Every structure is written in structure tokens, then in C-alpha cells.
Amino acid sequence: MNKCHSNTELSSLEGTRGQFNGGRCAIKLGIDVHQDFYVVVEQVGGTNPKPAQRFHKQAFLHWAAKLKQSGAEMHAVYEACGFGFSLQRQLAALGIDCHVVCPQKLDERNKRVKTDSLDAKALVLKLDRFVQGNRDALAIVRVPTEEEEQARAIHRQREQLVGTRKRLEAQGRSLLVNHGLEPVQNWWKPRTFAALAVPQRMRELLLNSQPILLALQEKIALLTLQLQSAAQPTARTG
């Protein structure tokens, strides 16, 4: 049975607890996620966290896989961000218990100093408490399935396109009002646009946006169909 090597510089509560409880040498990783790299702080057993390391994405996965090959129990944590849940899935595939948590204030001592290294260290210390049984230490986010994440992406894109369409439509109505004309709802739709009683110069100005609005509406309709198709199996099983 592997034993943890004592750290002669133990000073934290986590380190003291590891010494006297004879805790397992679980490896814990606090990860501060960025688009092109990760900043990682490792803690082995109850010892003090090691200095932060910076990895490119693939290099980190290779390093984590080598750690896992030692047979150690491994846990990891990172904050939910705009980069999805692929890292969680990749670590889970390596046999690493990875949690994604709500973004939160990590400067518990109010030092008002925020760095990637400090954030990663704060995360790994919270993870340590969580692994030891304090389930309130982490505010865990449910990781969606890949199918759910794809549906969310489609929904977000559809909402963005709808917002763009509404803004362009409103600009057209404002143009009409500013020139003393009555605003017309859905002025850009083919039949309505053909029937608009406006001067030719006004029609030319509106034509700068009308084809874009038609294209947007076509994309929105396609995304709507995709969402409806994705929802149908769930509706049947319910």
C-alpha cells in the first residue's frame, strides 16, 4: 500500500489533517481554464499545494494521463466558463473524477489580488475539502450530455439571430418614421415590401437591409426545425 511522503513544510489545516489522518494519496487538480492554456495547481494527499504550472491543452491532458497511470485516485475541478464541458469529458475519459463548478469569489481572504495561480490554488483547496466530505465546499454544475450541449448551442444561435433580425427590422421602422411615414410591421417580408407606398429613395434605403432580413429569417426557420426535431424523442418518452 502506497504511503504519502510527509511534507516538512506543512502548515495549512489541509496538510496537518493529511499527516494525522493518514489520508489516501489522492491527487487533486485545481484548473484555471483559458482559451489556449490551463493553469493547474496539484495537491497530493493532504500536503500543501504545489506551485502552479501552465500547460497548453494537449500537453495538460498528456500530463494528467501520466499521473493517472500511477494508479492514484484523481480529482479535478474548474469553473464553468464559455469554453463548454469538453475538458470535463476528456478528464472523465482518463478515469479522473472532474467537477465543474459555478464561478465564484475565490479570494476568500480578501487580499484583492487575482491571478490565475491563486485561482487554481483556491480551487484545489476547495476540492480537497469536498473530497474529504464537505459537500458544501463546491457549487457543482450539472454537466450536460453532448446532445444537450448541441441543442443549447442551436438555441443560443437562434436567439442571437432573432435579436439581430429585430434590430434591423426596428431600424427600418425608424427610418420610415423619421421621414414622416407610418411604421409598418414586418415591412421586410416580400408581400409587405412590394406593397409599401414609399418614395423610391426610401425603398432603396430599405433594400440595404431587406435581403439580410430574409436570409436571417430563413436561418431562424432552419434552426427552429432542428430544435423541434431534437425535442421530439424526449416528448415521446415522456
Image (cartoon, grey):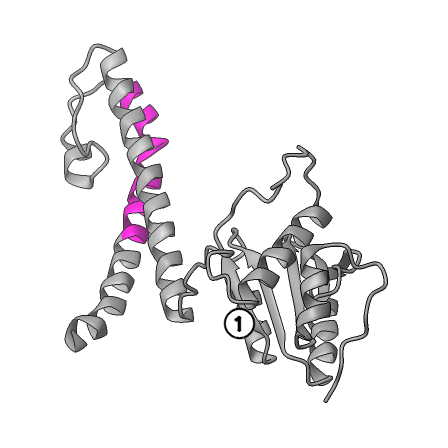
**Residue 47 screen position, x and y as percent:** 74, 64
Residue 125 versus residue 214 in the image, above or below: below
* Quarter holding residue 86: bottom right
**Residue 8 screen position, x and y as percent:** 86, 63
Question: Can residue 45 be seen by looking at this rendering?
Answer: no
- The amino acid on which the numbered mark 1 sits, given as a three-letter code, is Arg
Left or right of residue 92: residue 72: right
Q: Within the magenta stretch, is there residue 217?
A: yes
Residue 93 versus residue 44 in the image, above or below: below
- The quarter of the image holding the N terminus is bottom right
Q: Within the magenta stretch, is there residue 106?
A: no
Foreground residue among 7 and 56: 7
* Quarter holding residue 196: top left
**Residue 183 screen position, x and y as percent:** 18, 21
Going 68% across and 39% down the picture, which residue do you hit? 114
Left or right of residue 235: residue 144: right
Going 74% across and 85% down the picture, which residue do you hit? 2
Which residues lie in the magenta part? 201-220
Q: Which residue is mark 1?
A: 89
Mark 1 Cα shell of 10 Å, populated few (<14), some (14-19), many (≥20): some
Residue 173 versus residue 16 in the image, above or below: above
**Residue 119 screen position, x and y as percent:** 65, 48
Left or right of residue 106: residue 205: left
Please name the predominant secondary structure of the magenta segment in the image: helix
